[in-house]
Amino acid sequence: MRVPIIAGNWKMNTTVSEAIELVSEMRRKLDEIDDVEKVICPPFISLAVVKELIRGSSIRLGAQNLYFEEKGAYTGEISPLMLADLCEFVIIGHSERRQYFNETGEIVNKKLRAALKIGLKPILCIGEKLEENEAGRTEEVVTEQLESALAGIGSLGGLIIAYEPVWAIGTGKAATGRQVNETIGLIRHNVAQLYDKEVAQQMRILYGGSVTADNIAEFVQQSEIDGALVGGASLKASEFLSIVRQTSEIKGHLSG
Ligand code: PGA
């Protein structure tokens, strides 16, 4: 059985004091929900203070990005070494980074290697754009992104994949559970071909893109979907709690 994950990607939102407020608001209730791994990914500058706030709870911490060098003259960058001291997870290859910061498959690959080397668990994001989806190229694009991200990587550690169709991110237009289940099934198949069946069966693969408390059930009811990477809806304590709670109930029910 794969333990489901709900990860909140706060993106470039919340000042340090707002981050403290948001965590304080949901910490106790979030901690009480069992059978789901609960991960929050605040901005870099809030990682240290959030780490203290969730100490002793079952809430896990992740970063939203990293640089692939360990240290040195890279003004403004954050290294794997710095993150490993603070958190357990790191989002890599988010479509916003690919789109606005020119992250190529090669850079994503370097970042993955750096994260795995230091023992961070990457949440690798892949997904097709609207025009690729409309041209029926989803399978091809997702496969290509997966292969380039994982090129030459022998051991995947605790790697998690988030399938996030770009057209569904921040648009309010989520994909359907059935569509996503199919694509994630394909991704799992690809992982089995690149590694082996067991690695693929154990790998957690999430959906991301306009996930809310109103539509989470549609996704986590599907057998291949192991949870969600949640953007906008992770910034509201009550909504994020509801997403995590529903995931716990539905996945618990499915496995029981
Ligand atoms: P969204 O973002 O939930 O706001 O669509 C998801 C993501 O980018 O991970």
Image (tube, grey):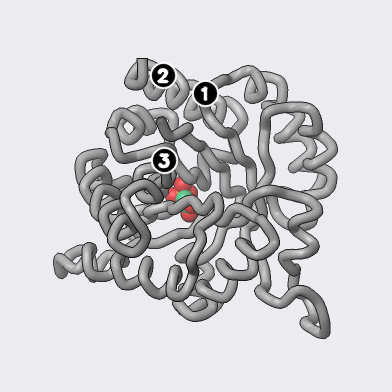
Among all residues in the image, which is located at the extreme left? 136
On the image, the x and y values in percent for residue 48 come to 83, 48
Give the spatial CA distance, label 2 vs label 3.
20 Å
Amino acid type indicated by mark 2: Gly
Residue 103 position in % (x across, y down):
51, 77
Going by the numbered disc 1, the residue's amino acid type is: Asp
Q: Which residue is mark 1?
A: 35
Q: Residues within 10 Å of mark 1 (few under 14, many from 20)?
A: some
Which comes sooner in the sequence, label 2 or label 3? 3
Local crowd size for mark 3, using a 10 Å CA cut-off: few (<14), some (14–19), many (≥20)? many
Is 103 on the left or on the right of 59, as rendered? Answer: left
Q: Residue furthest bottom?
A: 73
Name above or below for residue 256 compared with residue 87.
above
SS for dot 2? helix
Residue at point 57%, 75% (across, down): 110
**Drawn side of residue 239 relative to residue 201, left or right:** right
- Does any atom of ligand 1 lie closer than 8 Å to the CB of label 2? no
Q: What residue is drawn where x is 49% and y is 69%?
A: 153
Q: Quadrant of the C terminus?
A: top left
Report which residue position mark 2 lands on: 252
Q: Quadrant of residue 34?
A: top right
Rendered location of residue 39, percent (x, y): 61, 40
Dot 1: element: loop
Task: Find residue 20 and report its image quarter.
Answer: top right
Real-space CA distance between mark 1 and mark 2, rounded to the nearest whole angstrom: 7 Å
Q: Is mark 3 within 8 Å of ligand 1?
A: yes
Tell me the amino acid under the disc marked 3. Answer: Val
Say if mark 1 contacts mark 3, CB within 8 Å.
Answer: no
* Disc 1 to disc 3, C-alpha distance: 20 Å
Tell whether label 2 touches label 1 (CB within 8 Å): yes
The residue pinned by badge 3 equals 211
> Foreground: 3 or 92?
3
